[in-house]
Image (cartoon, rainbow, N blue to C red):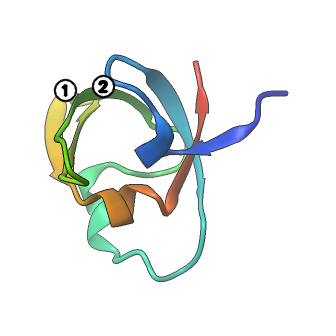
Amino acid sequence: MQDKIALDKLNKGDEAIIDSFANDSLPAKFYELGFAPGSIIKVKHKAPFNGPICINILHDDSLIAIRKSEAALILARKK
């Protein structure tokens, strides 16, 4: 069994499967954007100086930038 890792800790090019959320403070819009448990994602870009992280949700090929603080609340398992 693989350990859970927050999306902000993944490196550029890493793929992962969303597993769960650290707490319930994450807005519902993230579910609507595709950040649901079981979704496969790929980190496309990480901006320097705690900037946003660009995530590709593979099932619908959407590209979404989220804050590092929000990415820290989304837990995944590396592929």
Residue placed at 46% from the left, 58% from the top?
Answer: 72
Please say if 4 is above or below 24: above
Position of residue 5 relative to residue 58, above or below, is: below
Q: Position of residue 65 (x, y in %)?
A: 16, 48
The picture quadrant where one finds residue 45 is top left
Q: Position of residue 54 (x, y in %)?
A: 20, 39
Disc 2 packing (10 Å; few <14; some 14–19; many ≥20): some
> Residue at 24% of width from left, 60% of height from top?
67
- Image position of 56 (left or right of 5): left
Q: Secondary structure at mark 1?
A: loop
Can residue 31 be seen?
no
| Residue type indicated by callout 1 | Asp
Marks 1,2: beta carbons within 8 A = yes
Separation of marks 1 and 2 at Cα, in angstroms: 5 Å
**Badge 1 is on which residue?**
61
Taking the image as shown, residue 57 lies to the left or right of residue 16, namely left
Q: Which mark is residue 51?
A: none
Give me the residue at 59% from left, 25% from top: 78
Label 1, residues with CA under 10 Å away: few <14, some 14-19, many ≥20? few
Quadrant into which the N terminus falls: top right
Q: Residue at x 69, y 42 (%)?
A: 4
Q: Which residue is mark 2?
A: 58
Horizontal and vertical percent for residue 2?
A: 77, 28
Q: Residue furthest front?
A: 49
Residue sitting at the far bottom:
25
Q: Amino acid at mark 2?
A: Leu
Q: Nearer the viewer, residue 16 or 51?
A: 51
Outermost residue toward the right in this view: 1
Image vertical order of residue 66 relative to residue 40, above or below:
below
